[in-house]
Image: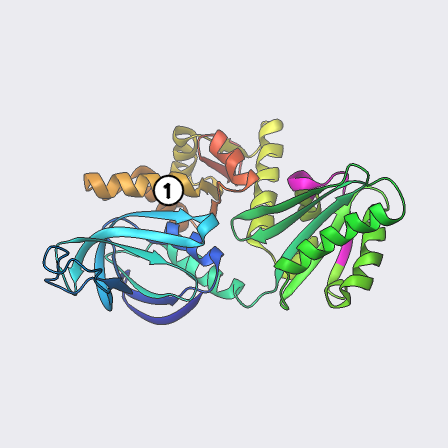
Amino acid sequence: MKVLKKFLKGREGEISLMIDSLEDLWHLKYIIDPNDVVFALTKRKPEGASDKIRPEKLEKVTVRLGLRVESTEFHKFSNRLRIQGVIISGMDVGSYHTFNIEEGTNLSISKKEWKNDQLERIKEAEEASSRPSVIMVGVEEGDADIGLVRHYGIELYSHINHSSGKRVGSLRESFFKEIADQLAFVYNENASVIVCGPGFTKDDFLIELKRLYPEIASNTGVEDSSMIGISGFMEVLRKGSVDKIMKESRISREAEYMDLLFKEIAVDGKATYGLKEVKNAIDYGAVDVLLVADEKIRTEREESANENIENAPIEQMMKDVNLTQGKVVVLSTEFEPGARLESLGGIAALLRFKM
């Protein structure tokens, strides 16, 4: 993500962005709220034209429209974000329209109040765009997984299974070649690769990777893990290998906070969870780190916009924590730590002192 222009007066104003990646589209899902105004180029039939007047297919023209947002939908597997709303600027004012935002799109977002977490998301996405991407490959005899490290978690790209993988010779070479070919398909020149798994299969695979794709192998490291798949990738993540490449990745930070939270909960220590309990801790000035699930915030903001509520509970709690020099961390519910937080009610806190 790249910030093209920023016009803010206090918390109100407009920010123009260039969307560079799938992760940027995911961030936008939590940056854009109902009642925001979004401007972008789009295609629409010429004003006044109708199929009844001209039965032949009408060509759409490219125009710049401003929509008052009603809803957003992130389509991860089609690489787009749909923004739906009513046109307030441009042709056909008052009509409904949908922006299909994809990589390479420029758009402007105008808000009456930009929230801290939204501005932080933009800053984080812009900084992340200059870091290398990370691809993880988990390998054991006969089975392999390829995962892509996203801002919102680890996305399982593919699973390769060769039931005869334990045999030596051409069958094993075929297994390794299929992994290498799939890895090459998602690899780019800015990517780094981590190969993990139990035993020595991962080391044998790296030898074959050096023969097949020496350029990829030159940007590949090896880590031990007790298993493959998401659980194995999480194990490597907790060792800090991804952080060494990405310079403190978002998902590593989220995993670390949730591990600490559950550790404190297990010993009845400096942690609490649930809306009422966390609110009480904030009132006492006890919250050091507030952990909130992204979907919890998004749902509350949508409900607040529909019901015209100014100081919704979680929004106010986030502001109160910032005022007491605490830290607010928003976790992705598409990733295991955020899903664990959601199971606790979507909100928890690490405390300065035991309540």
Q: How is the image coloured?
A: rainbow
Q: Residue visible at 67% across and 51% down?
A: 136
- In the image, is residue 327 above or below residue 108? above
Left or right of 238 on screen, residue 50: left
Q: Is residue 247 visible?
A: no
Q: Quadrant of the N terminus?
A: bottom left
251 relative position to 53: left or right: right
Q: To which quarter of the image does residue 89 belong?
A: bottom left
Image spot of residue 129 (x, y percent): 52, 65
User: Dot 1, how many residues are within 10 Å of its Cα: few (below 14), some (14-19), or many (20+)?
Assistant: some
Image x and y of residue 229, in percent: 67, 40
Stretch in magenta: 221-232
Query: For this rendering, which residue is in front, 214 or 37?
Result: 214
**For residue 305, which quarter of the picture?**
top left
Q: Which residue is mark 1?
A: 297
The relative height of residue 249 versus residue 89 in the rendered view (above or below) is above
Residue at the image point whose x is 36% and y is 45% from the top: 320
Q: Which corner quadrant of the image does residue 206 belong to? A: bottom right
SS category of the residue bearing label 1: helix
Can residue 111 be seen from the camera position used here?
yes
Q: Specify whether residue 227 is painted magenta.
A: yes
Amino acid type, residue under disc 1 in the picture: Ile
Q: Position of residue 120 (x, y in %)?
A: 43, 58
Residue 302 on image: x %, y % = 28, 42
Closer to the camera in the image, 122 or 355: 122
